[in-house]
Amino acid sequence: MPTQHTAVEAPEATLSRLRATFTTGRTRPTAWRKAQLRALRALLTEKHELFADALRTDLGKSATETHTTETGFLVNEIDHTLRHLDRWLSPRRIPVPLALAPARARTVREPLGTVLVIAPWNYPLQLSLAPLVGALAAGNCAVVKPSELAPATSAALAHWLPRALDPEAVAVVEGGVPETTALLDLPFDHIFYTGNGTVGRIVMTAAARHLTPVTLELGGKSPAVVEPGTDLATAARRIAWGKYMNAGQTCVAPDYLLAIGETATEIEPHLTTAIHEMYGPSPAASPDYGRIVNDRHLDRLLALLPDAGRVVTGGEHDRTTRYLAPTVLADVPVDTPLMRDEIFGPILPIVPVPSLDAAITFITGRPKPLALYAFTASRRTKQRLTAETSSGALSFGVPNAHLTVPGLPFGGVGASGLGRYHGPHSLDAFSHTKAVLDKPLLLDTLRLAYPPFTTRKDRL
Ligand code: NAD
């Protein structure tokens, strides 16, 4: 049985230890991959309470949200992968041009080697382990670097992952900027980073030194378009659900409303009602409402509030518990700091626009978002938004839920990211698709192709 490496190990030593494992071929058999995935599943179910406690400590996460967006989400991802892995791994036959016949062509997936997963704090379990599911399913060794801003979850991962999984193939390195910088100096075979675009650029620059491929799962301002004629009460409930989940600290949360025409004012009371229905008249007392991750982020959010529009509901905060109420702001000017960067907190600005054309111009004039949501009864509007805008994902009638469709790719485009994962797309992210051609020597049908290039008659 391999030993567990609990003492702090130099990053170079961790990489060479994992590389040595990869070189033995141990991680390649499908049976090994499935055993790791089953072990990870067992860890998540058996230690569910422990991870739930860690997430409550880090983010005030409710047990239900922990289940739906962290542990339960991961179990679904593992089950889906286990169900389809054989098929995803089977070689694909590719047709061969007649001029090359007889020959057979196929593609085979091969693992990349030892990969690095760098995770953020907002879904600290899901975003450390969902990439790991893909890395293991593809037959890689992996170093996981959880976020130092979710220290309880990071410590739980560091303690349990090497105990549950093959410790010679999976390692956890804890720490912040210095530790991540040291890891980024090393020649990993792939780097999978989730977090903000500024650090994304640092990751990509470091990776370029070794020509290491990267996946960058970034964020951005994801708009929610609301059009007249839609059911505003339901739209408001769904928008509030997506926005205030995890106290707004969700990469795919609707960042702001682009409210067309009279919906800008008409939706206001529906949003207030939805918030009260979900979290009661005093959300601070609700066990289902999360907290801001740290004082720095609370200060950042509070600084966005003055002069940012009319308060429809919310705005209250409590520094001692890092509480910020679910907040809706109306008549928000587009040149406020609130509308410049991703909010990443429980503040929902309503930006009025006169028409769908204006909404499309607004969206396409800004960096490509991770998600675009639209609440409309019009098929024509859906077609136009599909054809005329670009975003990591486009979802009609519901925010955030596209992540729960295991076959859909998850990732950004442009400023919101590079690459995609989940389900079979994780296999793509963590494998090389190798071209294999096999032409028998028995009949030399290539003689016509060889020089000298004289007339065909001479050679027959
Ligand atoms: P974070 O501060 O936890 O940083 C992410 C990771 O980068 C951490 O592991 C951290 O240690 C590391 N890091 C931070 N600074 C670094 C540096 N200078 N050099 C090297 N490594 C460094 O998380 P965050 O970036 O605040 O996360 C929030 C952002 O992530 C938001 O923009 C959000 O939209 C985005 N996000 C995207 C997704 C997605 O799947 N696309 C998911 C969650 C969050």
Image (cartoon, rainbow, N blue to C red):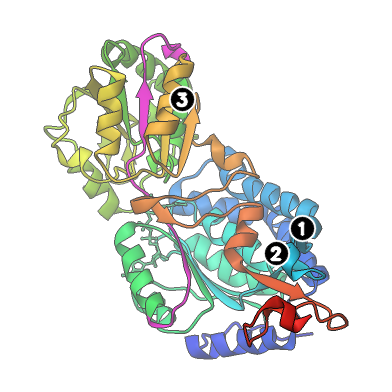
Q: Is residue 108 magenta?
A: no
Q: Is residue 375 visible?
A: no
Amino acid type at circle 3 is Gln
Front position among marks 1 and 3: 3
Position of residue 322 relative to residue 25, above or below, is: above
Image quadrant where residue 344 sits: top left
Which of pointers 1 and 3 lies earlier in the amino acid sequence?
A: 1
Report the residue marked by disc 3. 383
Measure the C-alpha gap from mark 1 to mark 3: 34 Å
Label 1 beta carbon within 8 A of ligand 1: no
Quarter of the rendered image showing ligand 1: bottom left
Q: Position of residue 272 (x, y in %)?
A: 35, 18
Residue 137, numbered circle: 2
Toward the viewer: 131 or 431? 431
Quadrant assignment for the C terminus: bottom right
Image quadrant where residue 200 sits: bottom left
Amino acid type at circle 1 is Leu
Q: Residue at x 50, y 27 (%)?
A: 398
Label 3 beta carbon within 8 A of ligand 1: no
Toward the viewer: 93 or 10? 93
Q: Residue furthest right?
A: 442
Which of pointers 3 and 2 lies earlier in the amino acid sequence?
A: 2
Badge 2 local density, few (<14 within 10 Å), some, or many (20+)? many
Q: Residue at x 17, y 43 (%)?
A: 303
Report the residue marked by disc 1. 85
Element at label 3: helix
Element at label 2: helix
Q: Is residue 113 visible?
A: yes
What span is colored magenta in the figure? Answer: 209-234
- Give the side of residue 456 with respect to residue 283, left or right: right
Q: Cβ–Cβ below 8 Å for labels 2 and 1?
A: yes
Measure the C-alpha gap from mark 3 to mark 2: 36 Å
